[in-house]
Structures are given as C-alpha cells and as structure tokens.
Image (spheres, helix red, strand yellow):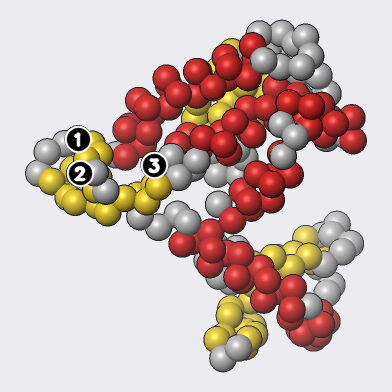
Amino acid sequence: MDMEFELDGITYPIVVERKAFQKNTYIRVKKDMCIHVTTGKLTSNRFIMNMIKENKDKIKDMIVLQKKKKDNNTGFFYLGKQYEIEYINENKCYIDGDKVYLGRDYDIYDFYKKEAKKLFLERLEYHYDNYSRKIPHPTLRIRKMTTRWGVCNIKTHVITLNLELMKRDIEYLDYVIVHELTHLVHGDHSSEFWDVVGENMPNYKKYRKEMKVF
C-alpha cells in the first residue's frame, strides 16, 4: 500500500526500498521531497512508520536541507552570484551586469565548460605550486557529476572536478582542489588526511560544511 507521513501540515510520500541482505533501516529525504526508506525484505510497514515518527525531527532537518539545495540550484548561478535570466533569440550565453542573456535552446553547460577550462586549470596549478607536500603533478579533467565535487585517481594522478563548481564562489573550488590534491598524499579520509588538508587550507571545515547546502 502507499504510505505517507504528515509533517507540519504537509504530506510527504514514503518510498520504501526493500533489499534481501539489508540488515539496518535508513531514512533519507531526496530531491523529489519523498521520504526514502531502505530496509530489509521482512521489515513491516508498521515498523517503518514508527521509526519515521521517532525520527521526525531529523527528517524535518533533512527537508529543510533539501529546500535550501533547491533554492541554491534554481536559476542561473555563476561563481557564487545569481543572475536574472533574459532569454534571447541567439544560440549563445553571455553575462552583462546583473543579467545573463541566454538562448532558449542553448546548453548553459557549454558556457560553463568554456569558462571552467581556464579557471579550473589556473586554480589547480596555483594550489599545486603552493602545496605543503611534494606530490606528483596532476592532470585535470572536468565533467558534470551528480554526487561528488571532485575525484582523484591516485594511480594515474588524474583529478576530475565537477563542472557544477562554476556556479559557486571560487573559495569552494579551491577547497575541492586542495581536498583532491591531498589524496595524492593519503588515499583515504583518515585524520592524517585532514591534517594535511588543514596545512594547506586552515579554514577548510567552513567550506566543507557550507557545501552541504549545494
């Protein structure tokens, strides 16, 4: 049967995913604003509803976070600033003042890609040149990713940066670059890893926390 949960006067659908070898039950609120529950095959709906009720405050926080993420991704953003969109009859995109002039069929990621090729490489080289440890020189790749801001292949020394970073202030790009460069020192996220991140960006915790609303 369909399941729902009412919170502060709003009804949220509950989507349950049952897995054969799942031992624990996990609750998430995703972009679709549904309450997603991952649990075992034999978990009853009654157990799920009770768990949701017991965790309603946490669910409320997850809903607030998803709403913030939606606000931060609605419209046109470039390097941390939101621009009013003015649609034009040309197949291009350019910024003038507080507006972005955008062709209706133009893929804005073509604009981001063009800008990112220069900016991302400049920032990567800057942080590599000023890095506190001796590391191999990395190769840059850029692509749009949905779940990660950056990826470092420690074998090939390739650092991939998320094109979505073009929407954010440069300080967040810098944090991601320092993070990925540090994987050339430590492949995991151990305390030693974070110590080295801190050597190169003492206030990294601020950016790491703030990026959760993107």
Residues under numbered marks 2 and 1 in contact, where contact means CB atoms less than 8 Å apart: yes
User: Picture coordinates of residue 76 (x, y %)?
Assistant: 35, 49
Give neighbour class at mark 2: few <14, some 14-19, many 20+ (Cα, 10 Å).
Answer: some
Q: Label 1's element?
A: loop
Mark 3–mark 1 Cα distance, whole angstroms, equals 16 Å
Looking at the image, residue 187 lies above or below residue 145: above
Mark identifier at residue 101: 2
User: Picture coordinates of residue 149 (x, y %)?
Assistant: 60, 38
User: Picture coordinates of residue 38 (x, y %)?
Assistant: 75, 64
Give neighbour class at mark 3: few <14, some 14-19, many 20+ (Cα, 10 Å).
Answer: some
Q: Label 3's element?
A: strand
Please tell me which residue lies in front, 200 or 14: 200
Residue 6 sits in quarter = bottom right
Q: Label 2's element?
A: strand
Amino acid type, callout 3: Tyr
Mark 2–mark 1 Cα distance, whole angstroms, equals 8 Å
Q: What residue did someone put label 1 on?
A: 92
Amino acid type, callout 1: Lys
Looking at the image, residue 66 lies above or below residue 101: below
Please tell me which residue lies in front, 115 or 10: 115
Sooner in the amino-acid sequence: mark 3 or mark 2: 3
Mark identifier at residue 35: none
Mark identifier at residue 78: 3
| Residue located at (63% from left, 33% from top) | 176
Residue 154 sits in quarter = top right
| Residue located at (76% from left, 17% from top) | 132
Give the number of marks: 3
Label 2 or label 1, whichever lies nearer to me, is: 2
Q: Which quarter of the rendered picture does the N terminus lie within?
A: bottom right
| Residue located at (57% from left, 36% from top) | 171
Please tell me which residue lies in front, 19 or 5: 5
| Residue located at (17% from left, 50% from top) | 87
